[in-house]
Image: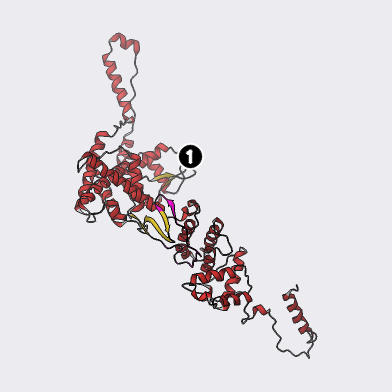
Amino acid sequence: MPNIDEIIRQIVAESRAKGGRALSSSRVYSDEPILMRGSQLSNYHPEPIRQMRALSRTPEARSWSDARLFVEQARLMADYEDNCPYSGTFLSYFPTYSAMSEQQLRGYFTWRSRVRRGTIEKTSASFAYVYLYELINGVDVKPGVRAFRAIEAFWQSYREFEPAMDRYVRPWLVDYVVYHDLSPALAAPYLNTIHDRAVAILQRAEDRALAEEASRGRRRARHSFGSDPQGDKALLRALDELSTYRIMESRLYRDDPEAVCSVVRAVFDDLARYYRSSRTQGLTESLFGTRRSMPHLMFASAVFYPGCKHEDCVYELDETCSYTCRNGIWTCDALHDGGARSAKLGQILRATDRGLRLAMNYPHPLKEHGDPKYLQRIIDRAASDYLAWHEKNAPRHIEIDLSKLAGIRSTAAVTREALLIDEEREETNLPTAPEPVTSKAEQEAKKDLPLGLTMDELGFIRTLLDGRTPSSNASELLVDSINEKFFDLLGDTIIEFDESGTPRLVEDYIDDVHEALA
């Protein structure tokens, strides 16, 4: 078959040659014909597009829904390719072929041809959605895993141009897995299950607290601190995930995670019992509602025509969500709370953090925010009970002051010398421990050093403040001693080791160190 573009070039060349030589002064310049393919003319309508338009005017199509008409037209145009770039735009709230002009149709099919060859370019967002509708309806790809991957791949590429596409395509991918009975693992990345599973943990913890109350027959049961540390940590993680106040990022949690875990668990248990006795809804239900079945529209906001009624089925997507189809009507059994964090739960956790700090005389208190009296009473009791339990059950820590060992040895030697008889003294001839010699100037200098620092520690800090690197034999014990002496002042360490093992001052505390040494 002849190359049309080559024929056009030959005709144009021959037309120019008839005008004489290029340097002829007698040549008259005039308009030259611009030769184009017939398919490139603005009024040219390819036969497949004319057939597609004609389909919408058939008597049969008059009874079709817009979604069915789109799918029938898409199947007719499944293999069509075009070569007529379109520089305009196409914007439509409900984009279909019927909403496009002739030039927009040709522009869309030209863009689609390049997409199918692997070249995804930015275009009108409505064009991109039409292409997704084709894939959802199984046009040019067999429904199943292959079509799922095609939808996923196009979306992940085109979202760089249109990030807002996420809000639609993510639920469409989940619906596609459910509708075609694919593996739940395909939908896992696009589910909001972290939130729902955290709510499930809260509900189980509430049920356990109420069961303990019923078994003991007491309204104010004692808190079993330390009996289930793993369960306490799991509950705290769930609360932290669901709350607007991130208690696991608080300063108190970094310093004493056991206290925070234990008291939060006690407060949660007491609140669950309080809600049972004084509210119509339980604690978890009042915060996040309950799991229930609600009508579900498959591929909401997309153009979707299934062709026939889906068979009855039950699809368990995961432990927090399942879908049911009855007579072609879908329902979703899940927690329909929107997945947002709870400000009310955030108030509870912040009040607990604040109350525990007050009970522990923590040096970094939080401001009071007018929390309910009943909540303050519950927190105060839980914090008081924990501190009493901790005082009674905490392991005893024995600290030895190594600086006093020399004095102890000296005193013991003197005592032993006094107890010896003359014969024993002559035989053993025990040496006495020498007293450390310290000049008067050194003693006066130590009195003036801030925070109890030694001269070596002070010199080490000043080296870091000057931006110099300490000697390679810098001891970790020296750094630990400096950090301990600054901890009471700042509540944090001031020196850290970088990846190469070189000590560095923490940038946030440089001004504080300057002020402390001033």
Question: Which residue occupies the foreground of this view, 226 or 251?
Answer: 226
- Residue 4 image-quadrant placement: bottom right
Question: Which residue occupies the foreground of this view, 294 or 392?
Answer: 294
User: In the image, residue 369 lies at what x, y percent?
Assistant: 24, 56
Question: Which residue occupies the foreground of this view, 305 or 419?
Answer: 305
Local secondary structure at mark 1:
loop
Q: Which residue is mark 1?
A: 472
463 vs 444, left or right, is right
Q: Is residue 109 above or below residue 328?
A: below
User: In the image, residue 478 lies at what x, y percent?
Assistant: 40, 38
Boundaries of the magenta span: 295-321
Q: Please tell me whether the stretch drawn in magenta is mainly helix, strand or loop.
A: loop
376 vs 400, left or right, is left
Q: Does residue 69 show up?
A: yes
Q: Residue at x 65, y 78 (%)?
A: 40
Q: Does residue 491 show up?
A: no
